[in-house]
Amino acid sequence: MAEFQNYNNYCKVTGRLARQDVVTLWPKQDTLLAAEVELMDLSALEFIDSSGIAFLFHLVEQQQQANKPLKLINPAEQLQPLIALYNLQTLFSEA
């Protein structure tokens, strides 16, 4: 399961983020990110599926609605095919 490690304005996501993990994390979504987080680093994700991507973008949208911009950075190499498939390049920022 994915872990969200918060360091001031930075959150590193590690582990796996698949459908079953999203089901487990969904009730905790309001506590996964520290209030000051502006960057979410995805370089240490070992696995992610389309449910995991949807969950990450839900978190981004949730932060934006609270006027707290959140940028996704450093997508893991295994995430690259999904980014290309769903044309999500513009949603990732350069670190």
Image (cartoon, rainbow, N blue to C red):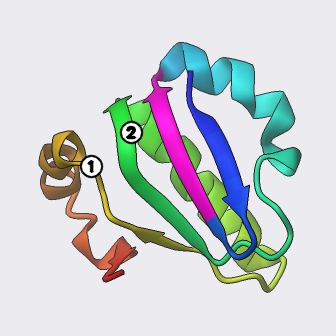
Q: Residue furthest front?
A: 7
Q: Main secondary structure of the magenta part?
A: strand
The residue segment tinted magenta is 11-18
Residue 38 placement: quadrant: bottom right
Q: Residue 37 location in percent, x, y?
A: 72, 72
Indicate which disc, 1 or 2, sits on the residue closer to the N terminus: 2
Labels 1 & 2 near each other (Cβ < 8 A):
yes
Return the residue at label 1. Answer: 76
- Rendered image quadrant of residue 73: bottom left
Quarter of the image where one finds residue 75: bottom left
Which numbered circle lies on residue 24?
none
Residue 13 inside the magenta-drawn segment: yes
Where residue 6 appears, x then y in whole percent?
Answer: 71, 57
Residue at figure coordinates x 84%, y 77% from the top left: 66
Which amino acid type is marked by label 2? Leu
**Which quadrant: the N terminus?**
top right
Query: What residue is pinned by disc 2?
Result: 45
Q: Is residue 92 left or right of residue 27?
A: left
Q: Quadrant of the C terminus?
A: bottom left
- Distance, label 1 to label 2, CA atoms, is 6 Å
* Amino acid beneath label 1: Ala
User: Which is nearer the eye, 29 or 7?
Assistant: 7
